[in-house]
Image: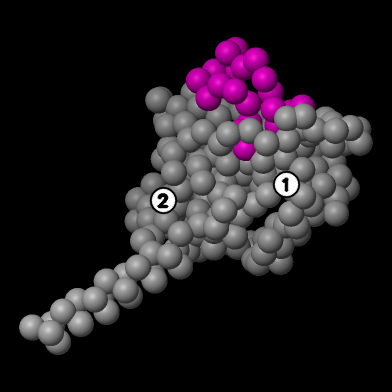
Amino acid sequence: MKKSLLLSCAAMAAFAMTALAQTPAETLPLGAKLPMADTKMKSIDDDMYAVRDMMGENGVLVIFTCNTCPFVIGAEGYGGGWEGRYPSVIGAAKKTDVGIILVNSNEAKREKGDNLADMKAQAEAGKYDDIPYVLDQNSALANAFGARTTPHVFLFDKNMNLVYRGSIDDSNESPDKVKEPYLFNALGNLAAGKKIEPADTKPVGCSIKRVQ
């Protein structure tokens, strides 16, 4: 009985350690340096990219996203959620000389919905397949960022310091309902050398599906 109890306690401790190892850190604080900048990840064009590779003259934008969250894709499967604004976000980033990379960290949904083939199809349908959309194995990048949701946005300046984090804007339902275009304002202010305000907004969306 005593031996069985000890084994049970050991098993529980091992489970706790595994869960702890896969629990994301606190969300990256403003001013923090870009983590895992040189980690290569496979993209929908079958090439490998690191976030540093995408740095523009004024910085880089990292968006944690997926193919299965209704906050991203909308109720109809595309265009009703924030994903419908990705082409506009990409255009704004290019206009302000900020690089951009989309990251899929849904490791628990690789068998169906969030594998590389699904990502290719989704990006092509959404007309944002001209930029890297990468597969984050074991949610490693998401864990380093402390990314919580899909979407979750992180904007870094040219020195790779975090200057904005949170949501794209204040309405996932429709661009017509947006009153505060947080990310678009942040991109413009970054390029103009102005203060980004607000620099920290609440990320809204589905939780990133990590393997526990």
76 falls in the magenta region: no
Nearest to the observer: residue 9 or residue 59 = 9
Residue positioned 46% across, 48% down in the render: 208
Q: In the displayed image of the protein, which residue is found farthest to the bottom?
A: 3
Q: Is residue 26 above or below residue 77?
A: below
Can residue 210 be seen here? The reply is: yes
Q: Nearer the viewer, mark 2 or mark 1?
A: 1
Q: Residues within 10 Å of mark 2 (few under 14, many from 20)?
A: some
Residue topped by disc 2 = 209
**Kind of residue at badge 2:** Lys
Residue positioned 19% across, 76% down in the render: 8
183 falls in the magenta region: yes
Q: Main secondary structure of the magenta part?
A: loop
**Kind of residue at badge 1:** Leu
Residue topped by disc 1 = 30
Residue positioned 50% across, 42% down in the render: 149
Residue positioned 32% across, 74% down in the render: 13
x%, y% of residue 6? 20, 82
Q: What secondary structure is found at the residue carrying circle 1?
A: loop
Which segment did they paint magenta? 166-185
Label located before the other in sequence (2 or 1): 1
